[in-house]
Amino acid sequence: MTVRDRIIIGVMGASACDAAVDALAADVGRLIAKRGAVLLCGGRGGVMEAAARGANEAGGLTIGILKDTHRKGCKVNPYIEIALRTGLGDARNWINVCAADALIAIAGGWGTLSEIALAKKINKPVVLLGSWKLQASPAVDPLPTADTAEQAVELAFSLIEPVDEA
């Protein structure tokens, strides 16, 4: 399988996190890499760094979608192998969502919430892991939640629609 054909799982979450969330995000990253998928994140600290570290340690490929425009002064965590500087600030969240086949939201603040909402807007699968507790209207399907890294990764993969190889 070429890199082009690999599944991309986006891991979204807070730019700062405690040790428990760090360990959870690292486990998610490791499991994504072990499944042969690419990990995509915002490329900075907190959940993003922990997930990228886990994927990197398991031999996975990591992509960071960064807010910055230039290499100089760009804050990118050391576990990102491909750093894409967009110059878009928080608007890069749209790239995070569109580029991933599915998303896992771990903890997180307003930026993570925006990524969850954008994903739902375009019917992109998103799994909540210790993240926002959202009450949708009866007309909206509830968001899937997971209690463990294993559940989150398994659920994310199960929600990805197969691609016809025509």
Image (cartoon, helix red, strand yellow):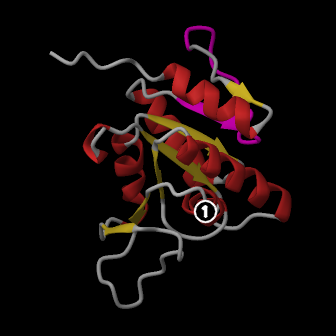
- Residue 83: x, y in percent? 37, 69
> Looking at the rendering, which quadrant does residue 109 occupy?
bottom right
- Residue 51: x, y in percent? 62, 57
Magenta stretch holds residue 131: yes
Residue drawn where x is 43% and y is 28% of the image: 124
- Residue 81: x, y in percent? 41, 68
Residue drawn where x is 30% and y is 47% of the image: 3
Query: Element at badge 1?
Result: helix
> Looking at the rendering, which quadrant does residue 161 occupy?
top left
Q: Residue furthest right?
A: 20
Residue drawn where x is 63% and y is 9% of the image: 138
The three-letter amino acid code for the residue at tag 1 is Glu
Magenta stretch holds residue 159: no
The C terminus, quarter of image: top left
The N terminus, quarter of image: top left
Camera-side residue: 75 or 136? 75
Q: Is residue 120 left or right of residue 2?
A: right
Q: Please tell me whether the stretch drawn in magenta is mainly helix, strand or loop.
A: loop
Camera-side residue: 102 or 54? 54
> Looking at the rendering, which quadrant does residue 111 occupy?
bottom right
Q: How many marks?
A: 1
Q: Is residue 119 left or right of residue 164?
A: right
80 shown above or below 161 = below
Residue drawn where x is 53% and y is 77% of the image: 78
Q: Residue furthest top?
A: 139
- Residue 59: x, y in percent? 52, 58
List the residue tagged with mark 1: 57
Camera-side residue: 77 or 1? 1
Q: Residue furthest bottom?
A: 72
Q: Is residue 70 left or right of residue 117?
A: left
Residue segment shown in magenta: 126-140
